[in-house]
Image (cartoon, helix red, strand yellow):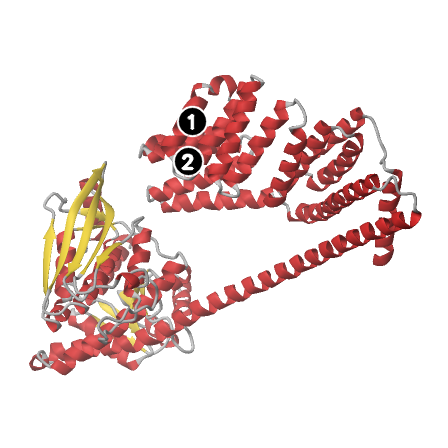
Amino acid sequence: MRIFFLLMLFLNCFVNSANAQSEVISDAKINKLVQQAWDDFKDANFEKSLITSRVALNYATASKNNYLIAKSYKIIAGNYNELSEFDKAIFFYNKSLTYANKTNNDSIKYSLHNNLGNIFCFEKKQFDKGIDYYKKSIAYSLKINDISQVYYTNVNIAWAYFDIGKFKEGYPYLKFVGNNIEKYGDKSTEIVVNMLNGMYSSYLSNNDTANAYFLSAIAAGQNSDEKSDLSYAHLEYSKFLTKTKKFKEAYDNLTAYNQITEELYNQEKLKKASIAGFNLELDEYKRQIDKIENEKISQYQSLKKSRIIVILFVLISLILLVLIITLIKNIRFKKKHNLELLQAKEIAEEASLLKTQFISTISHELRTPLYGVVGITNMLLEEHKELAQSQHLSSLKFSARYLLSLVNDILQINKIEENKVILENLTFNISDEITMIKNSLSFLSQKNNNKIKVYIDPCIPEYLIGDKLRLAQILMNLVSNALKFTKDGEVEIIVNLNKVEEKFYFLEFHIKDNGVGIAVVDQNKIFEKFVQVGRKEEDYQGTGLGLSIVKRLLGLFGSKINLESNIGEGTSFSFVIPFEHDPQKTKKIIDEIEVDLTSSEVYKILIVEDNLINQLVTKKIIEKNNYVCKVVDDGFAALDIIEKENFDLILMDINMPLMNGFETTKRIRLKGISTPIVALTAFDKDEITDEAISSGINDIIVKPFEPIKLFKIISYLIKEAKNVG
C-alpha cells in the first residue's frame, strides 16, 4: 500500500508538471476559504484551520495572488504558533512576509512583524530581535495611520522590556499606553495593561499599588475570554507575592496559572493537528519539487527528444522519493526520540523518589542511636561531675554532634533541592544570635588557636523579624569553615546596616579570615555539593556540603554570596539579607512563644517507646524536671494503661513494632481521650506532619532535641488542654 501511495503521488506530480497548471478558481472563493480557515483558527479548531488554509494556499498559488498566498501562510504560521511549534511558525511567517512584500498592503505587513515580535520576545527569548520587529510593525501602522495598532504594539514592547527587567526602557511605552487607554484600550488589553502597571509598581516597591493593579488584572481576566492573559496575570502576581514573602498566596496563584495553561491546550486537538501539519509539510515539499520541475521543463522546452524529457522526469521523481523517505524517517525518529525521553523522565522521577526514601530511612536509623549516645553522654556528665573534664567524654559528645550535623546537612540539601524549605518569621536579636554562634564554635577556635572578633553596627535595631534559624545555619557554616582553614589567626564577623526600605533593614554580613585562602581557579567549585578543595595538601574534615547549603539558603532569602580570596591572603565571604523591623509585630510573636516553666505543679507523663536505651534517656530528661512518668514498650500497652490511669501528656514514638505511633494515637482518640500527644521521633518533621495531624497528634519534636524545647511544648500543651477543659 505504501509503494502504491508513492507511485500515485509521483503520477499526480508528473501530470501536474506536464500540464504546467493547477485548478484555478476565483479570488473571491479563495478569499472565502481563507476567511473560513481564520474563523476555525480563532475557534481553536487547529486541525480544520490547517486543512482549510492548505487548500486555500494551493488555489492562491495557482492563481498567483500574492496577497492571498501571504494570508494563507500567515494563518498556517498562526496555527503552528498556537501548537508551540515556534520554529515552524517563524518559517511560515517569513514565507508570508516574502509574498506580503510583493504587495502594497501595509496592514498585513504590520500584523506579520507584530506576530514575529511576539514569538521572538515571548517564546524564543530573543528580545532584541523581537523588539526590532515590533518597531517595524509600528512604522507600518503609522504609515496607514492606524493608531489603535500602534497602541497594541506598545503594550507588547512594554511587556517584552519588563520581562527582562528593563523597566526604565519599557516605561515610555507603558506611559503611551496609559495616556491612550481610554481612546484605544479595550477588554482584550485591560488584563495586560493592569498586569504591566502592577509589575512596574512592584519594581518601584509601591507594593500596595502593585497589589491593586494585579487584582484588577485578575478580575478583568475572570470576566474575559482571554484566558491566556489571565494565566500570565496569575504568574506575575505569584512572583510579586513571593517577593513580598506572601508564599501561600503566591503558591495559590502559581497553581491557578498551571490549571489555566493546561485547559488551554487540548491534547487531542494537538494530536489531530499534528497529522494535518504533516500533510501540510508534504504539500510544501511537493510545491518545491514542482517549482524545480517547472524550471527544468522551461529550460528544456526546445528539446524535442522524448528520451531527455523522460530522464528529467525520472530524476525529479527520484528527488521527490528521497525527500518523502527522508521525511518519513524523520517523523519516525522524532516519535522514537520522544518515547525515549518519556522513559528517561520516568526513570529519573523513580530515581528521585528512591533517593528521597533512602535519605529518609538512613537519617531515621542514624538519629535513633544518636539520641541514645548524646543522651547518655549528658547523663554521665551531669551525674558524675568529676568526669566533666574527661577528654574522652567530650570527644564522644563532639563526635555524636558532628554525625548528627552530617545527617542534618544531607537532609537539608535534599529538602532545598525539592523546594520543601519555607522561610519562617521569628523575632530575634542579631547580637545574641552571633554570640551564641561564637560560643558554640569556641572548641573549634581553640583547636586551631584562633580568635573570633565580632562587630555589629549600632544602627541595627535590637529586635528583627525573619528566619533566624536559617541565618544561624549560614553563619555557622561560614564561620566554622573559616576556623578550619585558619591557624594561629583570627576570624571576623562583621554586620553592617546596608540600607533601609520601609520596614525592612538590609544587613550586610562579612565573614573574614586570614587563613590559607582559596585559589582563583577553585572559587567556582567550592559551592558545589561534596566538593572539597585541597589546600597545601592538608587533610581537612568535612563533607563538602556546607558552602553548597549556604548558597542555596541565601537563594531562599533572595540573596547571593560574594567571595574574595587568594592563596595565602585569607578569605572574605559577604552577603546581604533583608529583615523586618516592627516593634508591635515583635511583641506579638514574643507573647505567642513565651512559656512559663516556673510552675511548681507536678505533671504525670506517659512515655511510649520500644527502644530500651531511648526509654532510659527520655525518662531521665523528664524526671530531671520533677515530673512523674511511666514507660510502656508498645502501642497496645499504651492503650491498656490509659484506661486505668490518667496522664497529663503522652510522648509517643512513631516507628514501633506491632502498632506504630499514628495508629496508636488514632485508637486513643477513638476512645474519646483528649490528652495531649507529642510525637517524639527520629523522622524528619516535614515527612510526617500531615499524617500526624490527621491521626490526632498535637505536636512533633525530632530526636535528638534540646530538653528546654521539650519542656516548653509540654507546659504549653498541658495548660492549653486544662483551659479548654
In the rendered structure, the answer to whether residue 713 lies left or right of residue 686 reads left
Pointers 1 and 2 in contact (C-beta within 8 Å): yes
Element type where label 1 sits in the image: helix
Q: Residue furthest left?
A: 386
Residue 79 or residue 433, whichever sits in front: 79
Q: Is residue 581 above or below residue 574?
A: above
Q: Is residue 501 above or below residue 696?
A: above
Q: Which residue is mark 1?
A: 174
Q: Amino acid at mark 1?
A: Leu
* CA gap, disc 1 and disc 2: 10 Å
Residue 366 or residue 683, whichever sits in front: 366
Residue for point 31% across, 70% down:
407
Quarter of the N terminus within the rendering? bottom right
Q: Residues within 10 Å of mark 2 (few under 14, many from 20)?
A: many
Q: Amino acid at mark 2?
A: Phe
Which quadrant of the structure image shows residue 223?
top right
Which quadrant of the structure image shows residue 250?
top left
Residue for point 18% across, 64% down:
482
The circle drawn on residue 162 is 2
Where is residue 680 shown, x and y percent of the image?
A: 31, 68
